[in-house]
Amino acid sequence: MRYCRCAIRWLSMIALCTMVMTAQAVIETYEFSDANLERRYHRLSDELRCPKCQNQTIADSNAPIAKDLRFLLHEQLESGASDDDILSFMVARYGEFVRYRPGLDSNTALLWYGPLLLTLVALLALAMHLRGRQSAVSPVEPTEKEREALRARLGESNGGQDSQL
Amino acid sequence: MLAEVGHFALIIAFVLACLQAVVPLVGAWRGHSGSMLLAPPLAVGVFVFLLIAFVILATTFLQDDFSVKVVASNSNSFMPDIYKFSAVWGNHEGSLLLWVLILSGWMVAVAQFSRGLPLTMLARVLGVMGLVAVGFIAFSLLTSNPFERLLPGIPAEGQDLNPLLQDPGLIIHPPLLYMGYVGFSVPFAFAIAALMGGRLDAAWARWSRPWTNVAWGFLSLGIMLGSWWAYYELGWGGWWFWDPVENASFMPWLVGAALVHSLAATEKRGLFRSWTVLLAIAAFSLSLLGTFLVRSGVLTSVHAFAADPDRGLFILIFLALVIGGSLVLYALRAPTVASRVQYGAFSREALLLANNFIFVISATTVLLGTLFPLVMDALGQGKYSVGPPYFNAVFVPLMALLVPFMGIGPVSRWKQDAPSRWRQELLLPAAVVVLCALVLPVLTLGFNLWVALAVLFSGWLLAGLLRDFLDRTRTAKGLFSKWRRLTPSYLGMLLAHTGFAAMILGVTVVSQHNVEKDLRMLPGDSEDVAGYRFHFVGVNPVAGPNYDADQADFQVFKGETLVAELSPQKRRYRASGQVMTEAAIDPGMFRDLFIAMGEPVGEEAWAIRLQYKPMIRWIWFGALMIGFGALTTAFDRRYRLRERRLDTAETQAAMNSPAHAKA
Amino acid sequence: MPRLKLFLPLAAFVLLSLLLFKGLSLDPTSLPSALVGKPLPDFELEELHSGEILSRQRIIGEPMLVNIWATWCYSCRVEHPYLLELAAQGVQIIGLNYKDDSVKAVGWLKDLGDPYALTLADSEGRLGLDMGVYGAPETYVVDAQGVVQYRHVGVVDAQVWQSLLVAWFPEFRREGVSQ
């Protein structure tokens, strides 16, 4: 199912599309002066998007630009740049697009807080719903008859043993 | 000639599907039983002709008929036969044919196993499925004809099937996934049929439940296989990438999980009827949306099909008709009056409701993250990327939120339960679990907060399951009668929930204790990784049927004992010239050892990736249990009991009874 | 009215389909330059032929195209004849020879013709990096003040010129450039 989508639309971009989806493991053998830098290298290279690939991190892509960016990342880490420095360096050149973890701005607020908001709304709805359920007084179980009818309709014999879930 | 016969068979299938979509529905509307009775044979007819078309397409692949366009572009005569066969669905056109074939397979299954359904219901269900089939066969015929010829200028040799797809995992991954995707058309059709008939009751829930569980089980298995394949075939050891195409299959899975559970409440207690119908519509809609996302090219993905805006437009229009139509029907016909069934704030119903909210929020979140770049682009707000760091950050807490409820679920009672009883049931197990969470990580891989939490969570799930299991079987004497107490639906639940617990452990342990080393290695070099010594013996050229490879030989020692001999390869496929990493893996219940080759880096040195992946198998093993658990539930005896044929008067009476009255 | 609530899913779906419809006409792979609206970055690079050290100040002053090219880039060969035509019409084109071998590059221009008023030799790809270049060919429109106005990724041909680039070169708009 992996197709380079360079079909018709991108015929004019042949050169840019030579990164046909091969599954070539990308293995860089950079030396790091400190294990902490290596950890940061892996984390950042997994968060930066290769600008010319379909949907790959610079850590996963064989595209020349991904290789360049890995080199740059290694160089910047070794020269003591902070994560923020590196990210803003990349964003200044390739745009927000390079960040797989979008930074918080007015556009991405919905993205980042949406799930929390949804959860809160759902909790509120759940609480209200359950309160409504409990206060509605109806001591008789109205479904018993319904269940009876159902059992009859389904021709179920083992009416007594109601299996769970 | 053969291809033309296939094309013709597809056209006949289309005509039959049109009849199936119209005749039974009109019959149900007019109360004409003759037309309704036509539904099952028409479904069989559609299936037979699609099968003919499919077999013919497969034959053209096996016979290397390169005058057929899809064969020429996706297969060549040097490929092993099994990959020629799986190449049938390794491309857009062929996979679409498989899609409709499986859809018609589900129709035949419904016709076959739902003989007990009232005729009107059966006619409506098959009619709705027929409508879906019409759309997809038309899509195939009009925009993606698999039988298109390359005339003139038949190539002497075909191109290659993408080497990534030349893999056993990929032979069965798409069919299983499609079984799941398409399987959701059954609960969808039941929901639409119920809305048409205006009868959303426990009987409806009972009919559609086994189908839903089976479809969801297949989807679980399909996704699991995809993840496993990505792990060993993509060459870098990841197992989930949050790629749009993966998300496209994950969203219906999440909503399907909600549906599976809400159907339980609807069947047992007649609750959440409108909600359940909506979920059934949503699950299938998300399957369709997935099809659109994968085949239209609106999102960038590593595994999209060749994109074509015309195809995209066709699916979008179809989507608008099917989903839009069913949501209009839903808005007009779904019951607005909440059923008068009572349940307390502490009850199984309330827990299921919480479950449903969490799954739906999760699905919405995945949808939001997947479509966010598109939304921003459409609004002219620039280009954004949303990837794994985002999804992990929002998804993990949501799943963590699910677990507390999930642990109580099995011991909880319908209608009204009490926290004091839960305390009494679960206090002791909870204490044991907390202890385990503190001690187990220390004893094994070293204390890690996340692993401790994972042990706590999965232990909590298991504690609930075990407690309930013991409660259930306490009164039965003897192993056999204990076993008899366990219905397939109960066993299935047990299996699926245990699988979920196993997954939590696997995911957390591998993400926390995974060791990965990227190295430059010369033959003769050794490297220690997590207590294993990897010895690089050397590199040899090897020739496969349609590729040449460099093969590295490794010996892995633990202490002085040889644990494994591993031979990763770097392949170059002759037809396409594509280079591919074939990782070598020594699998184990508690750890995988993983070696992949990169580039040669000077002299005889190679860039090598060595990985130690503790408990990664638990992820797929857990998913397997979830899938098989879901399939098991369908064997429950109560689903096989056939409903007595109802005469119209009885149906009428049931419809008029207060519990069934519509708003 | 409780039934109104049931229309919510439909409303959400209508919004979603509008979005997807819009999505069909968008190109998810197109990536506008982060540099648009910003000044061309400063640099100090040798001129390919003369070896003279050039800076940003030296090249700006009139609207121009900055074309990223290399001898290893197949598509650059495809667009080259059209660049020659544009140059012949008087369009100011600055070449940026990106991550390339200078000797090969000089030979290439000798064989195929030289459309560039000046060619910057960026063998390390440093300026390319600062400009956010991610492949070749890419073509930037830089205005008289040295501000980047537009970036085109891929081959420049008559259609691209007429529909996307000519807007910044009003004096060439009317007569156009023949194919």
Image (spheres, coloured by chain):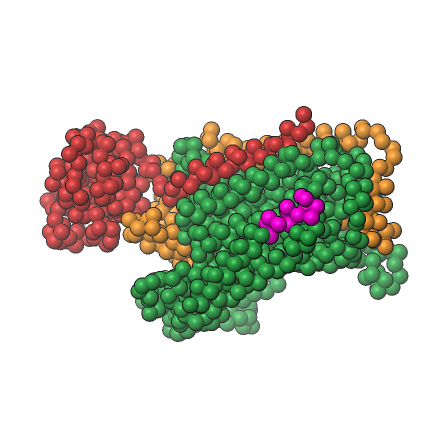
Chain colours: A orange, B green, C red
Seen at 47% across and 41% down, the residue is B386
Q: Position of residue B488 (x, y in %)?
A: 75, 58
Q: Nearer the viewer, residue C58 or B472?
A: B472
Image position of B138 (left or right of B444) = left
Q: Quadrant of the N terminus of chain B?
A: bottom left
Q: Position of residue B329 (x, y in %)?
A: 63, 37
Residue C96 appears in the picture as rendered = yes
| Number of disc labels | 0
Seen at 25% across and 46% down, the residue is C155
Q: Main secondary structure of the magenta part?
A: helix
Image position of B647 (left or right of B585) = right
Q: Position of residue B416 (x, y in %)?
A: 82, 38
Magenta segment: does it hold C5?
Answer: no
Q: Nearer the viewer, residue B100 or B169?
A: B100
Residue B346 appears in the picture as rendered = no
Establish if A90 lies above or below B504: above
Spot the residue most to the top. Answer: C1
- The residue segment tinted magenta is B20-32
Establish if A111 lies above or below B65: above
Image position of B123 (left or right of A7) = right
Q: Position of residue C116 (x, y in %)?
A: 15, 42
Seen at 49% across and 42% down, the residue is B317
Task: State which quadrant residue A2 falls in.
Answer: bottom left
Seen at 41% across and 45% down, the residue is B309
Q: Quadrant of the C terminus of chain B?
A: top right
Establish if C103 lies above or below B159: above
